[in-house]
Amino acid sequence: MRSIVKGVGHYVPENVITNADLEKMMDTSDEWIVERTGIHQRRYFTEGKDTTSSMGARAAEMALERAQMKKEEIDLIIFATLSPDYNFPGSGVLMQRQMGLSTIPAFDIRQQCSGFVYGLSMADAYIKSGIYKNILLVGAEVQSNIIDHSNKGRHIAVIFGDGAGAVVISADEKETERGILSIHLHAEGEYAEELVLKHPGSIRKNRMTVDIIENEEHRAHMNGPVVFKHAVSRFMEVINEGLEANNLTPKQIDLLIPHQANLRISEYIQKKMGLNDSQVFNNIQKYGNTTAASIPIALSEAWEQGKVKNGDLLCLAAFGSGFTWGSTFVRW
Ligand code: COA
């Protein structure tokens, strides 16, 4: 049994925030942001219009259309997000309601920037076990409202953006070449607090207090240099793990779509692996780091641009908060 990516879609909110816009909010510059991250602009959601689940639904509808499938054929939802609409229930059921899907099960999963690759492994396992046949996997985030836009949070504010991406993954009993070839996942909780949003969480008796707000602890915290250092080595390790498992060399990769964490991280991996520009896809320049949404948004745009063709060997790789990381190889 093979798990085939039948369709891919994305949705980004219309509100474009340029580096010049951020310059008005904090002490930063276009030059600093572009040099350190490669990002020129990102999208921010509009309250009352976009939500994590509604953006996920828009991306999912596009993926279904491109898969030429009806929503009634979907039998499982996996929704990857660190920024659900509510603390509970998850965004998966809210998207189910919005799309008018039947009483199929809906997971929310929380592996942050690795959420999409983790979700893919769940979808693949469910398909290979024969339990579900057509799975909607969504990565969606609203992060602009968990960012500290003061000088204290400027190293985070310049990186993250909002958006959603989705894929339809289907079972194919006859296929022998195409589909998901391998998935390798890892986690290392030792570094949980290096990229974290603590509050409102359950560790304090009162989930939200004045001091939490005054200390900006309801905003994301990131130790940038530590994250960078671990990201570059873990990305390399887990891509190499997948290459070895499939008996492949970097030259055979048609397209590497790394989680869009930071253009400098992608460029480092590209250089270390000896890949040429046409073997790596980046769109962080336009959207910033959209966490669980970044890989499916990039996959959708690469597909639109004709850079993902039947028979191509794709590598998708991610690293993020947790720390969590993973890679997958897919024959398209
Ligand atoms: N504009 C201008 N200056 C900034 C700034 C901003 N937006 N953010 C930080 N700075 C300053 C710092 O205050 C510091 O100043 P100082 O030397 O006077 O103290 C200086 O720039 C260097 O800060 P540092 O945090 O050490 O920068 P860096 O070179 O590590 O770059 C990141 C910061 C965030 C770009 C980088 O660490 C990074 O990309 N980390 C990985 C982030 C990532 O990928 N996260 C997602 C993982 S999924």
Image (cartoon, helix red, strand yellow):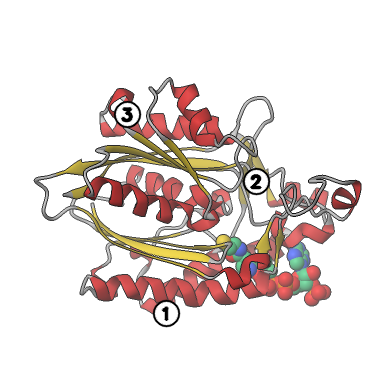
Q: Residue furthest top?
A: 100
Are dots 3 and 2 in contact, CB under 8 Å? Answer: no
Which tag is nearer the camera, tag 3 or tag 1?
3
Q: Quadrant of residue 252?
A: bottom left
Q: Quadrant of ligand 1?
A: bottom right
Give the SS element for disc 2.
loop
Disc 2 C-beta below 8 A from ligand 1: no
Q: Is residue 69 above or below residue 156?
A: above
Using the rendered view, name the quadrant where residue 145 is placed.
top right
Q: Nearer the viewer, residue 2 or 226?
A: 2
> To which residue does mark 3 refer?
65
Q: Is residue 27 visible?
A: no
Relative to 155, is 36 on the left or the right? left
Residue 291 image point, x, y percent: 55, 52
- Indicate which disc, 1 or 2, sits on the residue closer to the N terminus: 2
Q: Amino acid at mark 1?
A: Lys
Q: Is residue 242 left or right of residue 285?
A: left
The residue pinned by badge 1 equals: 272
The residue labelled by disc 2 is: 143
Q: Earlier in the sequence, mark 3 or mark 2?
A: 3
Please report whichever mark, 3 or 1, sits nearer to the chain's N-terminal start.
3
Q: Residue at x 75, y 50 (%)?
A: 199
Q: Quadrant of residue 101?
A: top left
SS at mark 3?
A: helix
Q: Residues within 10 Å of mark 1 (few under 14, many from 20)?
A: few
The kind of residue on which mark 3 rests is Glu
Q: CA distance from mark 1 to mark 2?
A: 31 Å
Residue 156 point in image, percent of width and height: 70, 58
Q: Which residue is pictured at 49% across the width and 51% down the height?
A: 294
**Quick check: 173 left or right of 187?**
left
